[in-house]
Amino acid sequence: MSKGYDHRAIESKWQQYWEEHRTFRVTDDRGKPKFYCLDMFPYPSGAGLHVGHLEGYTATDIVSRYKRMKGFNVLHPMGWDAFGLPAEQYAVKTGIHPATTTAQNIATFKRQMKRVGLSYDWERELSTTDPGYYRWTQWIFLKLFERGLAYVAEVPVNWCPALGTVLANEEIVDGKSEVGGFEVIRKPMRQWVLKITAYADRLLEDLKVVDWPASTLEMQKNWIGRSIGAEVDFALAEAKGAIRVFTTRPDTLFGATYMVLAPEHPLVDVVTSGDQKVAVQAYRDGAARKSDLQRQELDKEKTGVFTGGYAVNPMNGERLPIWIADYVLMSYGTGAIMAVPAHDERDWAFAKQYQLPIREVIAGGNVQEAAFTDTGQGAVVNSATADGSFSINGLLPSEAIPKITDWLAKQGKGTRAVNYKLRDWLFARQRYWGEPFPIVWVDGEAHPLPEEQLPLVLPEASNFKPSGTGESPLANLDAWLATTDPVGGKPARRETNTMPQWAGSCWYYLRFIDPKNQTQLVDPAQERYWMPVDLYIGGSEHAVLHLLYSRFWHKVLFDIGVVSTPEPFMKLVHQGIVLGEDNQKMSKSRGNVVNPDDMIDQFGADAVRLYEMFMGPLEAMKPWSVRGVEGVTRFLERVWRLMTDGQGQLSTAIVSTAPSHDHQRLLHQTIKKVTEDIEGLRFNTAISQMMILTNEMTKAPERSRAVIEPFVLLLSPFAPHVAEELWGLLGHQPSISQQPWPTFDPVLTVSERMTIPIQVNGKLRAKLDVGLEVAREEVEQLARAEAAEWLQGKELKKVIYVEKKLINFVI
RNA sequence: GCGAGAGUGGCGGAACUGGCAGACGCGCGAGACUUAGGAUCUCGUGGGUAACCGUGGGGGUUCAAGUCCCCCCUCUCGCACCA
């Protein structure tokens, strides 16, 4: 076989070269403009990398290589989100320490990434499991604690008595434990909680300043779920006290016909009458046994029980029966509602179920048929106090809301209020493989460790089985557990919870800036230079939690002066899911998983990179196709033959003479298209333009260096190995990645001739080839002749001529 | 149910602010070179014999609609009793 395109030899040669020459090391050159190009770092699973990971990684790699050639100082790092459940579950099963499996998995991921030719600065590699890293995760926790943003609460967990452990939501299938299928119940446990709700408004507000996908912005907004309304007190009829409710519809207050408390509401005991006690207790027990999921799934029929108690409507003094029902959630608002069945669908369904009265207070619908919930139309009715001193009758709901809210406030019966769906963040796991909390317990009180004692290293263990009490396996390590209060010196017990996986991923982008700093989380000057992240690419599965938690920590760090920007990630893009060849989601069970190692063995890294990008738009979901990989492989082979002879030497067709006008124009068009398409992340169309150029140049017996060399530069971010090799064959020194990006002259992109389509009544009838500077009259005259066949004997009503675009005869 | 996005050849997908629909690739067909080709190169390839018809369906605006407006259908993703 002649010396064709040998991807194996070329790719290993250049990967070795880059490694030896530290080609992609980021230097602290602050004279250049910076570009921070970040991938969401992976959890290094045992399965290794799959082609879906590679899509995002290739995209950021192309952008990084391109930006370097454009003269930017590019920060393009990679690390490992390596704490987490799978390694621990594996340890429980096999006894192999999570640190061991994690190290193996990281080695695999790293080897695979290097094979793809990703231009990370590996000298900045980090792992969330490294004490040098989690020291600062713990440090941030201390800052949160200092500021009152971390607190302890009794929060229900998924407790599995048979397994003697707390389960994560993903370990529960259909309300049973995934392992063994045992019963899972809700059990309150002492947990750390972060007060993310304190930042709800800022998290919502600053969504305005980031360049993110609309869907992700929308999801974050919905997750935060800000709603404006009023809190209103309904005095109890037979006892002291009042039920406080939150409502977004104070305009419907006169339509309240009953009250509902969440089953867990503390006032239930107060309001329940003697004869209802048994029924109420039974209902509460039933509700406690249901998981959140089960409570939510029961959307068919609403259930509830009358407590026997009554509250008083502050507007008209009416006695309203108080019910309990699990459609009211203790965790939202005040855990109690006023029910207005005429104008709320849930209350309407409940009222129908239990034959409670429905009273219309907004005219415009038929409230016996369905709840009328429109706030944009309808007039308030039946809504005045008995003495006539206050009325909102006749108003639109939107006018009535502020009026009645003001009145309630003046009477001391209510107040304007804002509520969020966002809950505080449950920040504790009963697991071994996570960051230990820098907290000790003394006489039931949480004491923080002093900063100098960080990191609090995760203790060695050989048994990863649960403690049996619901505490983490750390509770088994008596020697580690018993300590002394660093302040008072009293005996103390260490916190046994560990942090959730989200913790380490909340701030990793900051550590990449200054990964080896021993004294600070990040050097402030470097932070100011590199932040914010300019481009962040990762899966949409992180659209809410990771991105929201990160933003929350970032804002806290901003408040304490550690970071200089209010938001961490300026531009965010989600790569689409790569499906199997059968158009189904890749999964082991379907047997349609594509292994990147196999693909690289067969076609080479450059071909795989190119195909990842050529499949379709970055953000779209699209199927893998081995035929498609073959297609781009053929393209690379064509590029290879374009410049080489059969012996692997530079082809004699490569000449130093100036290119033809056509070739020059094609080159400038290609530079323009590839440049603009990389900027817009439209890699698929950039590649198709390079294919056009290759096809065109292949036809030419003489291929000018003035075209070929810039073309190799354009290709280099996409197919860096073959580009390095060709660059060498063309007589240049490595590395091509350090060459400047070619520029185009807009004048040279336009041809001196153009084709004008001729339409008759909007239908294409002929075409005209004319010079650029042709006058309208001339075009019209030529077009008339061309279209004579269609115009003959017809009355010409109008001639539309769009300059340099088209001519249309209307008859 | 609510919210967001998307429907274009046999397939993946192009088409800038309304202006030649189907770039590029796959597949398919024909030819060339070959002992041979599942290599390579060249040409062709939306449908229809044609007039014409074609961007999920139906209306509309316009000289002109994949693109703008109204109604409907399908799919994907997210949320799902949040008062």
Image (spheres, coloured by chain):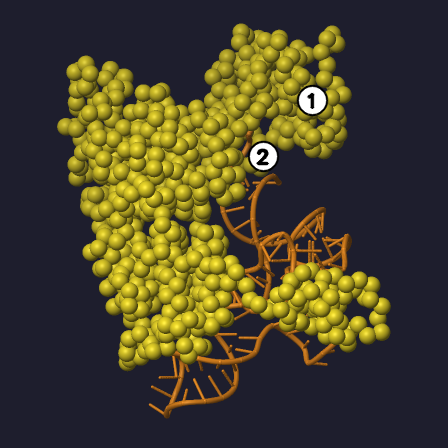
What label does residue A399 carry, if any? 1
For label 1, the SS is: helix
Using the rendered view, name the quadrant where residue A154 is placed.
top left
Q: In the picture, which chain is yellow?
A: A
Residue A749 in picture, x, y percent from top left: 51, 62
What label does residue A353 carry, if any? none
Would residue A515 appear left or right of A358 to someone viewing this image? left
Could you tell me which residue is drawn at 48 percent across and 59 percent down? A745
Could you tell me which residue is drawn at 31 percent across and 60 percent down? A736
Question: A660 above or below A570?
Answer: below
For label 2, the SS is: loop
Asked whether the viewer can see residue A402, the reply is yes
Q: Which amino acid does label 2 sit on?
A: Glu
Using the rendered view, name the quadrant where residue A405 is placed.
top right
Q: Mark 2 lies on which chain?
A: A
Question: A74 above or below B11?
Answer: above
Q: Which residue lies furthest to the left in this view?
A: A479
Could you tell me which residue is drawn at 47 percent across and 17 percent down? A266
| Distance from Cα at disc 2 to Cα at disc 1 | 34 Å
Is A335 or A260 nearer to us in this picture?
A335
What label does residue A301 carry, if any? 2
Determine crowd level at label 1: few under 14, some 14-19, many 20+ residues with C-alpha closer than 10 A: some
Which tint is chain B?
orange
- In the rendered structure, which disc, 2 or 1, sits on the residue that comes first in sequence? 2
Residue A497 in picture, x, y percent from top left: 28, 30
